Image (spheres, grey):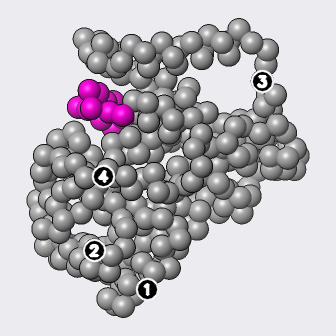
Amino acid sequence: MSSVPLAPSLEEEVAPETAAFYRRALGTLAGAGVSFLVGGAFAHACFTGIRRSTKDLDLFIRREDYERVAALMQAQGWRTELTYPHWLAKVYAGDDFIDLIFNSGNGVTPVDEQWFRDNPEAEVLGVPVRIANIEDGLLSKAFIMERERYDGADVAHLLQANAERLDWAGLLRRFGPHWRVLLAHLTLFGYIYPGERHRIPAWVMEQLTARLAAESAGAPGQDARVCAGTLLSREQYLHDVEQLGYVDGRLTPASTMTPGDVATWTEAIPARQAEPALPRAGALEPCHQADPLPATRPTPAA
């Protein structure tokens, strides 16, 4: 494993009682030999030096480890909740909580063995832990483009602080068929930091722009009735799938989500909870009704 410069260990970001909860939870998991990775604000601080207060602690785990983790947490007297079965669970100690993340909200980045390779080490509240790799953190953040939350600045800061040490070939593989999302962020990076465009390897930009040129010159794709906007925002493209008849990108092989997952995740949108449901233009079926997007990743398993 590699090491990263020691970032703030959350001592200044959280209250003492909350810190005690986090420390005990981390120690419990480490002592039990459970594989987990620390992400969120702490990992971002490790890789960028940007410190910010955090309302929770983000831990990445494999979905198949959730039941074991839940049992360990419950044995400590804490409450667990499988909040969204397709991607997120929580551990509660009073008002404090820890997020257990095993996928992304859009179902595109499940946590698998690839996440647990050559992870940097650091300390959180005195507990030695492994940190989610920059590439996986960047991949997860790249798709968060909600009206109320956009993680593009985090992506830009990760690139600005780490461009020379990124595994660029691995990053391209991780984005796979979603390479346009990566290209969009790299293009914005060159706009945000015009004097640092050269830090993105020329071959990366050449490869991505060549793909763009080839697609632009070709005939319309067979997935013409798919709206992949739902992979970027759970709310802002509902009009397309509910009123215009597009197939939801989350119901193609690009995502691990099921129709039930999509319904649950949509119902949780605060604005939707306060409004009556709109009539649908027509019943939409999952991916077998239209040619799907390519598989989520080019390498098998998260």
User: From the image, which quarter does the C terminus lie in?
Assistant: bottom right
Q: On the image, numbered disc 3 is attached to which residue?
A: 221
| Magenta highlight range | 153-167
Density class for disc 4 (Cα within 10 Å; few <14, some 14-19, many ≥20) is: some
Q: On the image, numbered disc 2 is attached to which residue?
A: 30
Q: Secondary structure at mark 3?
A: loop
Q: Decide whether residue 248 is among the magenta residues.
A: no
Of the two numbered discs 4 and 3 on the same chain, state the one appearing first in sequence: 4
Residue 158: x and y in percent read 30, 35
Residue 68 position (above or below residue 90): below
**Contact check, label 4 and label 3, Cβ < 8 Å:** no
Compared across the picture, whether 100 is left or right of 48 comes to: right
Residue 72 position (above or below residue 15): below
The mark lying in front, picked from 4 and 3, is 4
**Cα gap from disc 2 to disc 3, whole angstroms:** 48 Å
**Contact check, label 4 and label 2, Cβ < 8 Å:** no
Kind of residue at badge 3: Gly
Q: Decide whether residue 166 is among the magenta residues.
A: yes
Q: On the image, numbered disc 1 is attached to which residue?
A: 71
Q: On the image, numbered disc 4 is attached to which residue?
A: 119
Quadrant of the image occupied by residue 116: bottom left
Which residue lies at the image location 49% right of the left edge and 57% below the top edge? 112
Kind of residue at badge 1: Ala
The mark lying in front, picked from 2 and 1, is 2
Which residue lies at the image location 23% right of the left edge and 76% below the top edge? 27
Quick check: can you spot residue 7?
Answer: yes
Q: Secondary structure at mark 1?
A: helix
Kind of residue at badge 4: Asn
Of the two numbered discs 4 and 2 on the same chain, state the one appearing first in sequence: 2
